[in-house]
Structure formats: structure tokens, C-alpha cells
Image (cartoon, rainbow, N blue to C red):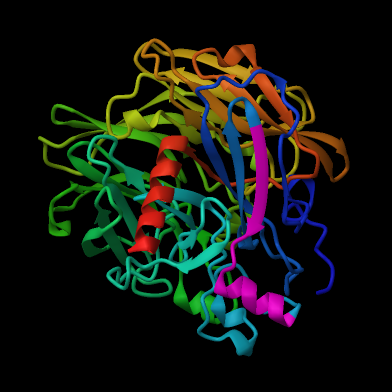
């Protein structure tokens, strides 16, 4: 195929751009607080080549790493492709060589056995290192200053898993990173690797366990005591893949599960709880301990949000019919059995965010994105084909909800949180907002929003001079963290 398909995966905010560019001293409308000093890294899927198949999906797009560098109220921007093995092979060939989403049996024979990951989901900062990640392979290390690709990262050969999550969790007190990789032993395998890296980025533990069925474990959580692995019935099947079919098919009649183990314990200590049939969640706001109880806040829906995964499983549900809500699942670790309690604590939505300091602890508030039914038809684009148009703030302790709705024809990308040194303030949220100006054309802005007053809207806006494609996830890295990493790199080079 020489042209991009005219589908939801390649139109709207998913319209391919494929341009590496940078700009300094972007215009700022309003004032960016001096305390916002660091880098907002974004993972942007943007296909460099038109796909082999007409029905390709946005999740297969080549990863680009983008960076807003903010200091002294000024903003610089840069974006580059992550030079994965896949990207470089197709760049050399000047055509697509890799086939359907996560199905190597549909690839050109010339790339058999090559690394298929596109590193397009989450920029992860840990141990002074920036990784671009996607859960179907290992992360790729990227230079946080230049955005040049350094290479695949496997903890210097210590990590045995073939995959690494796009959603690790970092303990705010110990600095340790807890992570996992599913299909760790190969395509459609039940193997899940659970790992821990110390604050300096050294691998200190890797254990493997079997999940009940091969599901897309996109996210997990930690508490101060436990690691929590939710399993939802969107499943992989090797025979289906060999026949050229979909990697994932949602099974509406299959139970969900939640595995909970001591986070420093053995995987043999995993305890499994049985959940509702057919439900789905790709992200979790947080989890925390409350005596013998473990609370898990889930961006829950009654079926899978991805239409192509529903279709592969024979689930005929239009996108607008999906129901759900921010849901708290509570597990009593002192009692036997597979049951747990469930209650809705907020409106439906996804792309949740809490302050990093609240990770694995009781969170006073959180933020996530939703669709405002009064905001007009949602803008097409994003990972599931339709975009969010409202930011929600919830306070689970008192039930208070505040919102920042957008005007019709606007879309909002996942925010990152920037903490404040003032204990009486909640800091700021940074996010990219798109405004539709034509069928497949948009104006984009970086917005700065006070985290404790989202209803006020942005206190500063940064109009972008060129088009931008929808991001998946982002990560905030402070100037202090960046400077420490730079100093460590210089010290290592001089040694």
C-alpha cells in the first residue's frame, strides 16, 4: 500500500504527520509558573510508512518521542522517531515490511525474527534513564537531551523477559521501580515476568508466573505491601495468529481476575480473586492498603474499548453504547475466598493521573479524562478512535467532582502532573489540547492548568506552530532529575 487508509486509525487526530522538528522559545499566552522547571516527555504514535494492510490500527504506528522543555516561563519543543529495529529496517527499505498489529506471521519474510516493537506507548523515567516503551517488546533507551535513540535496554542482559510493560510503578519513598512483562516467554504464552529495579536502575529481582489465560495486561498497581495484577478477558490465541488473524479478541463471557501478591514476596504467594465476566480496563488510578483491605481504583467499562478487539471476539457493540465508571474494587486479604467488593466512585473515563508522591498510598484526589455528553460529537482520533473532551478531578474521600469541559470540536490528551513545593497547593497539570479546524486538520496547544482548580481552565497556553498527532502517554521529569542524569553521564564518560 502506497497511501494511508482512510479509516479512524489514520484520520482525525490520527492523521499521519511523520515529521521530525524542533522549535525554541514558543509563544506563551499567559504566564507559566517558574516552579514548572523540567521536561514533559510524550509518546506519539505516527506511522513512517503506509501499512501493508488496509485494516491496520493506530496502535501499530511507529513511536515518536516528543519533549516540551520548560524553564523560566519559556518553552522549547522537539520530536524525533524512536529508531527501533523495525523503524530502521522499513526506513532502509522505504516501505512497510511488518504486517498486522502484533502478528509476525503476516510480516514480509525478510524481517522474520526481527524486533517488531514500535516503542510508541509511554516514556518512562527511572534511574536517570529515559525509556520509550510498548508492552510487546523491551524498552528503547533515548537520550533525554537530544532525543537520539541509544538502543534496546535489557538491564545489561540481566532481564530475561522478552517484554516490558508501558506502565511500571515507582515507589515515591524507596525510588524502586516495580514492573512486569506479559507474554514474557513468547507469543501468546501465559508467562508473566514480575521485576523490581532499585532507585539507581539496577535489576534486583525477576520472577515469572502464569496468568489464567493470555490477556492484555496493559497496567498494574502497587501498594506499600502488595503488587496487584488485574486480568481482563481480551485474549490471545496462537492458532489464530498463525492463521493471520487478530492478536487480541475480547471474550464477553469470560471471567476477569485479579492477582495480588506481597510486592517483595514470591509469585507462589499470588492470591487470585474472580471478577465479573466481560468487563475491561486498561488503566488504574491507584491502589493502596487500608489495614487488611486493598483498594484498587479502576477505569472500568462493561466491554473492551477497542472496536477491533471486540470485533475479533464477535462482540457487536457500538462505541457509544459502552458503559462504565471509575470503580473502586476492595479486597479483604484477611478473608478466604475469591470475592471482592465493588462500587462506582466517579464518571466513566480513562488516562488517569495522581501525584507521584501518592503512588501506592491513599490518594486525596486524582484526575482523568472523559467524554462530555453535552460537548458535541467527540473528535475522531486517539487510540480507540474517538477523543476525550473533558478533564475530571475526583476526591474519593468526600465524593467531590470538578470538571474542565472543552468547547465542541476540541480534544484533550492525557495530562502529566507537576508537583508544587507549597504543601497547600496541588501543583499543575500539563496537557496538549487539539482544536479541529478542518476535516483532518487541527491546531494544538500545550495547556497549563492549576491542579486544585481545574474548572478555571488554563492559566497558560502555548500554541504549536505545526500539526501534532495524538499522544498515548506522557511523563514529567524535573530539572533536578535531568541535571543529575546529565552529571552522571558526564562522570561516566570521564572515567
Q: Quadrant location of the N terminus?
A: bottom right
330 to the left or right of 256: left
**Near-viewer residue (94 or 97):** 94
Q: Is residue 246 left or right of residue 141?
A: right
**Residue nearer the viewer, 89 or 101:** 89
Region in magenta: 75-93
**Residue in the picture at 41% in, 30% down:** 327
Residue 328, image x and y in percent?
35, 29
Identify the residue at horizontal 37%, vertical 49% (top origin): 126
Q: Quadrant of residue 116?
A: bottom right
Coordinates of residue 104 in the picture (x, y in percent): 55, 78
Quadrant in the rendering for residue 323: top right
Residue 477 lies, with reference to residue 354, above or below; the image says: below
Q: Quadrant of residue 293?
A: top left
In this view, the residue farthest toward the right is: 438
* Residue 132 horizontal side relative to residue 447, left or right: left
105 and 495: which one is in front? 495
Whether residue 83 is in magenta: the answer is: yes
Visible in this render: residue 25? yes
x 66%, y 39%: residue: 76
Can residue 99 be seen? Answer: no
Residue 147, image x, y percentages: 58, 55
- The mark tally for this picture is 0
Q: Quadrant of the C terminus?
A: bottom left
Residue 158 image point, x, y percent: 27, 70
Q: Is residue 472 above or below residue 134?
A: above
From the viewer's perspective, is residue 213 above or below residue 30?
below
Does 338 appear in magenta? no
Q: Residue furthest front?
A: 494
Up/down of 106 relative to 289, above or below: below
Residue found 44% across the figure and 57% down from its top: 216
Amino acid at each position: 500500500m502506497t497511501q494511508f487508509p482512510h479509516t479512524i486509525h489514520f484520520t482525525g487526530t490520527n492523521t499521519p504527520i511523520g515529521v521530525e522538528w524542533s522549535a525554541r522559545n514558543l509563544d506563551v499566552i499567559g504566564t507559566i509558573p517558574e516552579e514548572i522547571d523540567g521536561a514533559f516527555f510524550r509518546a506519539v504514535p505516527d506511522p513512517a510508512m503506509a501499512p501493508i494492510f488496509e485494516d491496520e490500527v493506530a496502535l501499530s504506528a511507529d513511536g515518536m518521542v516528543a519533549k516540551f522543555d520548560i524553564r523560566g516561563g519559556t518553552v522549547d519543543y522537539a520530536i524525533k522517531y524512536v529508531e527501533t529495529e523495525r523503524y530502521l529496517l522499513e526506513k532502509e527499505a522505504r516501505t512497510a515490511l511488518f504486517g498486522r498489529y502484533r502478528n509476525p506471521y503476516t510480516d514480509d519474510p525478510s524481517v522474520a525474527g526481527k524486533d517488531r516493537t514500535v516503542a510508541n506507548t509511554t516514556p518512562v523515567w527511572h534511574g536517570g534513564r529515559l525509556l520509550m516503551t510498548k508492552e510487546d517488546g523491551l524498552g528503547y533507551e533515548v537520550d533525554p537531551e537530544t532525543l537520539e535513540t541509544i538502543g534496546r535496554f535489557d538491564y545489561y542482559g540481566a532481564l530475561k523477559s522478552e517484554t516490558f510493560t508501558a506502565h511500571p510503578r515507582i515507589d515515591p519513598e524507596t525510588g524502586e521501580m516495580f514492573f512486569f512483562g506479559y507474554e514474557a516467554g513468547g507469543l501468546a504464552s501465559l508467562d508473566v515476568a514480575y521485576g523490581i529495579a532499585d532507585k539507581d536502575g539496577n535489576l534486583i529481582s525477576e520472577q515469572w508466573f502464569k496468568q489464567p489465560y493470555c490477556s492484555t495486561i496493559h497496567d498494574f498497581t502497587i501498594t506499600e505491601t502488595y503488587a496487584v495484577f488485574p486480568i481482563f478477558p481480551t485474549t490471545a490465541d496462537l492458532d489464530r495468529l498463525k492463521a493471520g488473524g487478530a492478536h487480541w479478541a475480547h471474550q464477553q463471557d469470560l471471567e476477569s481476575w485479579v492477582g495480588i501478591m506481597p510486592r517483595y514476596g514470591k509469585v507462589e504467594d499470588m492470591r487470585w480473586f474472580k471478577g465479573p465476566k466481560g468487563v475491561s480496563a486498561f488503566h488504574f488510578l491507584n491502589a493502596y492498603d487500608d489495614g487488611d483491605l486493598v483498594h484498587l481504583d479502576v477505569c472500568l467499562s462493561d466491554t473492551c474499548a477497542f472496536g477491533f478487539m471486540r470485533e475479533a471476539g464477535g462482540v457487536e457493540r457500538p462505541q457509544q453504547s459502552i458503559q462504565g465508571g471509575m470503580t473502586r474494587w476492595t479486597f479483604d486479604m484477611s478473608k478466604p475466598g475469591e470475592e471482592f467488593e465493588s462500587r462506582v466512585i466517579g464518571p466513566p473515563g480513562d488516562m488517569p493521573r495522581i501525584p507521584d508522591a501518592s503512588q501506592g498510598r491513599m490518594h486525596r484526589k486524582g484526575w482523568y479524562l472523559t467524554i462530555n455528553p453535552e460537548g458535541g460529537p467527540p473528535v475522531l482520533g486517539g487510540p480507540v478512535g474517538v477523543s476525550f473532551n473533558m478533564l475530571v478531578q475526583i476526591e474519593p474521600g468526600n465524593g467531590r467532582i470538578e470538571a474542565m469541559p472543552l468547547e465542541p470540536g476540541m480534544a484533550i490528551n492525557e495530562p502529566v502532573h507537576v508537583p508544587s513545593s507549597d504543601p497547600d497547593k496541588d501543583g499543575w497539570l500539563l496537557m496538549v489540547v487539539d482544536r479541529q479546524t478542518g476535516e483532518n486538520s487541527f491546531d494544538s496547544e500545550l495547556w497549563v492548568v492549576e491542579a486544585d482548580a481545574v474548572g478555571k481552565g488554563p492559566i497558560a497556553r502555548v500554541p504549536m506552530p505545526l500539526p501534532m498527532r495524538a499522544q498515548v502517554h506522557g511523563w514529567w521529569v524535573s530539572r533536578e532529575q535531568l541535571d543529575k542524569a546529565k552529571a552522571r553521564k558526564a562522570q561516566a564518560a570521564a572515567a
